[in-house]
Every structure is written in C-alpha cells, then in structure tokens.
Image: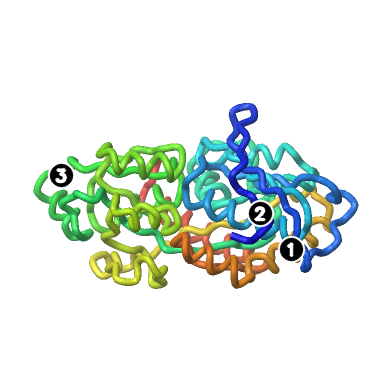
C-alpha cells in the first residue's frame, strides 16, 4: 500500500458502510479537477457489501484515484437488488459529478433483462472505463467431496435435485453463469441468492450451499486461506492463483464467462467532468502498482476506454439476452 494512505479509519453512516481514503502526498501525477468537482469528495458507490471481489477492486482503485487527483475518495457500499440500489442512487443523483458508480455487468446487462426497472441503465449512465475482467471460478468448501465439475455432475446424476448453489445476488454474473452452465450440462441445482460475494462465500464455508461460481478476486483470499477449494475456472485467462485449476470448458464445451467491473456516472454529469474522470481512470487503471495489487487479490486487469467499454457492453448485452431467452432463465 502506498505511503500516506490510511485505510483503517471506517465510518458507518445511515446504515452505509464507507471506507474513508484520505489522500495526502504522492499527487505528482495529479491533473486539475474541473470547477464542478474541485474540492468535492468523490463517492465511489458499490452495489455490494464489503469483502467481495467488486468491493476489493473498488477500494484499491479509490486509493489511486485519490493519489492522482488529490481529492478525497469515499467507497460507499449500497448493497441490494443485484446492485440496483446503487445504480438508482447514481441515476437519481443526476448531474452530481462526485457520484461515481463502480459498476458490474449485472447492473447494466442482466438486471434490465430479468427485473422490472424504472429506468434503462445504459440510457442513463455514461461508462467511463472498465477496471477489471476476470474469469469466474468454481469453488467448494475445503472439505467438500467434489474435486472437479465432473464430480458435481456425478452427484447430480446419482441424486437429481439434491444440490444447491449460491450467488452474489439475483441477476449477477455468478447467477447467470451457473444457470447457463446448468443449461449446457443438464445439471440441476437450486439457487440461493445472497447480498454480495462476501455473504455468499460465508454461506459456502458454513455448509449452507454446495458450490459457488465466483470472481477470482472474491475467491482468492479464501482459497489461499485453505477455507475453500477452486475446482474449475470459467475462462481461458487464468489469474496467478488459479493457473493450475482445470477449465470447466473441458467438461462443458462452449462455457466461458468473465466477471468485469468498471466506473460510470450519470449521463447528465457535464462532459468536462466525464473527460477528466476518463483521464484519471486511464492513468490509475494502467498504473503497474495498481495492476500488481489487483493480481494479488486474484483479479485480472482489463482497462478499456469509455468508447471501447461501451462497445463491449453493448455486444455482451446482445449475447446475454440470447442466452437468457434461449435457456428460459427466470428469476
């Protein structure tokens, strides 16, 4: 962690868990903030509880944004409804340039497909940069008898309907990923949604559920600690912690899925602020120290510019809608 940054002070305000990141020295790369943002506190709003992969990446990024800008940054957790509570907060904030949403694909892709929403996220939000893109990892409790996805399938065939799995919430990549995996493989398993990756993994460790398809960043600390085991990976790119883990696609052809995160603001935020934020995020997300910390957390770097990010999300939304419709995925 960089000198001059204290992540230990925490405050709970109005039921929200916040991490205060005072930003002092090391602002050599700082650029002048536009008048509408100068002197303000940036709120990096996360739609999930503390402790999950999305939250960990956001907190790491907050340090670098603060060091680069010289502004104060608060990581504010507003969990619930698959991230919709946080998204709604930013959309309702309209032109507030200090409200930055740390966004995932569930908030802008799957939620609109599966939930009744009062707004269309991609019509209300301006995507600024993708921060990370990591393959999902299939994990089980440390003493689970399952050593591979094939073992899970064997248990299903022996006793159909006896298995259950958890996710970070309805409509999250973890949820959609397993539903897609079920469709491709014929697996039957009951879904138990949690309010974020942290509570979901705790449920796995306590034996409430049999398996989870989780982001590498959220799974990595628990795999290292020996409390869960990784038995499969849902992608071709492998973070360092999972380089020896077998690809699920070897058993289920065509199954390949990443979990990504990024930053967005309301489209009503002035263009000057959006351009400033894009510049800041490009510098921070390509910082070698940030990338090293992200990998140490089990994540993968995945910066895309605003234009590239928007194009990628548009294409993924098309593919995801096809998956949801063809496989009759319902909440």
Q: Residues within 10 Å of mark 2 (few under 14, many from 20)?
A: some
Which one is earlier in the sequence, the residue at label 2 or at label 3? 2
The local secondary structure at tag 2 comes to loop
Residue 234 at x, y percent in the picture: 36, 63
Q: Residue at x 29, y 50 (%)?
A: 227
Image-based side of 150 in relation to 206, left or right: left
Q: Quadrant of the N terminus?
A: bottom right
Of residues 160 and 71, the one drawn nearer to the viewer in this rendering: 71
The local secondary structure at tag 1 comes to loop
* Residues marked 1 and 3 touching at CB (< 8 Å): no
Splitting the image into 4 quarters, where does residue 221 fall?
A: bottom left
Q: Is residue 78 above or below residue 6?
A: above
- Confirm whether residue 263 shows in the render: no
Q: Residue at x 41, y 39 (%)?
A: 199
Q: Which mark is residue 5?
A: 2
> Which of pointers 2 and 3 indicates the residue nearer the eye?
2
Q: Which mark is residue 145?
A: none
Q: Quadrant of the C terminus?
A: top left
Q: Residues within 10 Å of mark 1 (few under 14, many from 20)?
A: some
Q: Which residue is mark 3?
A: 160
Query: Seen from this angle, which residue lies furthest left?
Result: 158
Residue 115 at x, y percent in the picture: 51, 39
For the residues marked 2 and 1, what is the alpha-carbon distance in whole angstroms?
Answer: 9 Å
Q: Which residue is mark 1?
A: 26
Image-based side of 183 in relation to 103, left or right: left
* Residues marked 2 and 1 touching at CB (< 8 Å): yes
């Amino acid at each position: 962690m960089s000198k001059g940054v204290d992540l230990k002070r925490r405050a709970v305000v109005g039921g929200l868990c916040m991490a205060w990141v005072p930003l002092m020295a090391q602002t050599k790369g700082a650029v002048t903030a536009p008048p509408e943002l100068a002197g303000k506190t940036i709120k990096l709003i996360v739609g999930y509880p503390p402790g999950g992969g999305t939250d960990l990446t956001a907190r790491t990024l907050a340090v670098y944004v603060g060091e680069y800008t010289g502004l104060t940054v608060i990581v504010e957790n507003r969990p619930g409804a698959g991230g919709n509570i946080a998204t709604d907060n930013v959309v309702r904030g309209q032109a507030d340039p200090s409200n930055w949403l740390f966004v995932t694909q569930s908030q802008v892709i799957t939620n609109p497909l599966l939930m009744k929403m009062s707004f269309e996220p991609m019509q209300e939000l301006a995507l600024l940069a993708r921060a990370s893109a990591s393959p999902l990892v299939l994990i089980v409790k440390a003493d689970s008898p399952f050593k591979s996805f094939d073992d899970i399938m064997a248990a299903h065939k022996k006793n159909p309907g006896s298995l259950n799995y958890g996710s970070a919430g309805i409509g999250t990549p973890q949820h959609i990923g397993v539903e897609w995996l079920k469709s491709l493989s014929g697996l039957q398993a009951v879904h138990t949604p949690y309010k974020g990756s942290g509570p979901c993994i705790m449920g796995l460790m306590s034996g409430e559920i049999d398996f989870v398809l989780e982001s590498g960043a959220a799974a990595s600390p628990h795999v290292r600690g020996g409390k869960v085991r990784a038995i499969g990976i849902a992608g071709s790119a492998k973070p360092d912690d999972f380089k020896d883990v077998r690809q699920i696609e070897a058993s289920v052809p065509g199954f390949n899925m990443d979990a990504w995160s990024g930053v967005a603001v309301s489209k009503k935020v002035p263009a000057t602020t959006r351009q400033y934020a894009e510049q800041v995020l490009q510098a921070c997300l390509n910082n070698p120290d940030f990338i090293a910390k992200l990998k140490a957390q089990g994540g993968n770097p995945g910066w895309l510019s605003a234009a590239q990010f928007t194009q990628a999300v548009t294409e993924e939304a098309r593919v995801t809608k096809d998956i949801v419709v063809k496989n009759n995925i319902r909440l």
